């Protein structure tokens, strides 16, 4: 699975053009490719990608039902708009909006109940890793999910070391392999899908995908450049 996260980028015509190129992307039937445009362009992008193999999702949603929540969208809206998945707990949201896995549980539940799949982001800061606490931190981020009594069929986890996001830095091959193997053990599911995210590029992708414990990538910056994104999809298919 290769997912592009456009974050707060693109004006409408750029989003449409990028989506038109994505619709032409050659994708093998066993590869799942998706994109999360800014929520305001979701409809535009969704219309272009309708009938193509590329899925559309949201970058975030809240767990609340309909009501007085200025500026928010919920999972029912995501499904009604044709989304197939929602990213939850991205570190940029954890940092800026004080989200924690505990506060994300209702959103996780709502996304699962809406029949969409959540991509739950976890990952340590540079400090955590320097202090040898990377696994402990990721374990603590996942623990509330596992004890919340949710039906986790379809859950996708994205391991995204915070210090590697948008910095051009990447975790080492062995750290990626260790963390992904650990996350799989924590989830204790044979079918667990665990993506890696953190400055994935056409250059770094072959190394990232070398680990059997990696199920694909969550791609930020490089997903805004169709040639780079296509090269990452190709690297996945050639691994
Ligand atoms: C991300 O936004 O999840 C991400 C990994 O970004 P980038 O690829 O730009 O580091």
Image: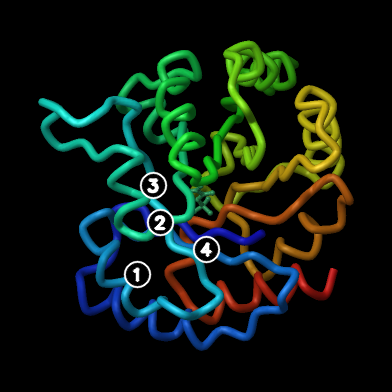
- Under tag 3, what secondary structure? loop
User: Of 154 and 2, which appears nearest the observer?
Assistant: 154
> Horizontal placement of 71 versus 43: left or right?
left
- Residue 168 in the image, given as x and y percentages of width and height: 57, 53
* Quadrant (top left/top right/bottom left/bottom right) for the C terminus: bottom right
* 24 up-or-down from 87: above or below: below
Q: Toward which corner of the image does residue 187 lie, by quadrant?
A: top right
Which residue is identified by label 3? 59
Q: How far apart are marks 2 and 3 (CA)?
A: 11 Å
Q: Position of residue 223 (x, y in %)?
A: 49, 66
**Circle nearer the N terminus (3, 4):** 4
Cα distance between the residues tagged 3 and 4: 11 Å
Name the residue nearer the viewer: 65 or 132.
Answer: 65
Residue at (55%, 59%) from the top-left corner?
3
Q: Which of marks 4 and 2 is in front?
A: 2
- Asked whether mark 4 lies closer than 8 Å to ligand 1, one says no
Mark 2 crowd level (few <14, some 14–19, many ≥20, 10 Å Cα): many
Q: Residue at x 65, y 77 (%)?
A: 231
Mark 2 lies on residue: 83
Whichever of labels 2 and 3 marks the residue nearer the N terminus, that label is 3
User: Which label sits on residue 46?
Assistant: 1
Task: Decide which of tag 4 and tag 2 comes sooner along the chain.
Answer: 4
């Amino acid at each position: 699975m290769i997912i592009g996260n456009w974050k707060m980028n693109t004006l409408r015509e750029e989003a449409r053009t990028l989506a038109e190129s994505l619709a032409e992307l050659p994708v093998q039937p066993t590869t799942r490719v998706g994109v999360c445009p800014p929520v305001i362009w979701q409809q535009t992008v969704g219309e272009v990608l309708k009938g193509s193999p590329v899925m559309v999702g949201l970058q975030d949603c809240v767990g609340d039902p309909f009501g007085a929540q200025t500026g928010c969208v919920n999972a029912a809206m995501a499904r009604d708009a044709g989304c197939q998945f929602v990213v939850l707990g991205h570190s940029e949201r954890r940092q800026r909006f004080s989200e924690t896995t505990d506060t994300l549980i209702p959103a996780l539940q709502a996304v699962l109940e809406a029949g969409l799949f959540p991509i739950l982001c976890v990952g340590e800061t540079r400090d955590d890793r320097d202090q040898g606490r990377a696994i402990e931190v990721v374990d603590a981020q996942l623990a509330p999910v596992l004890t919340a009594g949710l039906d986790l069929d379809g859950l996708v986890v994205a391991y995204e070391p915070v210090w590697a996001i948008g910095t051009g830095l990447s975790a080492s091959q062995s750290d990626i392999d260790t963390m992904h193997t650990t996350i799989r053990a924590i989830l204790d599911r044979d079918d667990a899908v665990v993506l890696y995210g953190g400055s994935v590029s056409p250059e770094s992708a072959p190394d990232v995908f070398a680990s059997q414990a990696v199920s694909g990538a969550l791609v930020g910056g490089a997903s805004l450049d169709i040639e780079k994104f296509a090269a990452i999809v190709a690297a996945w298919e050639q691994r």
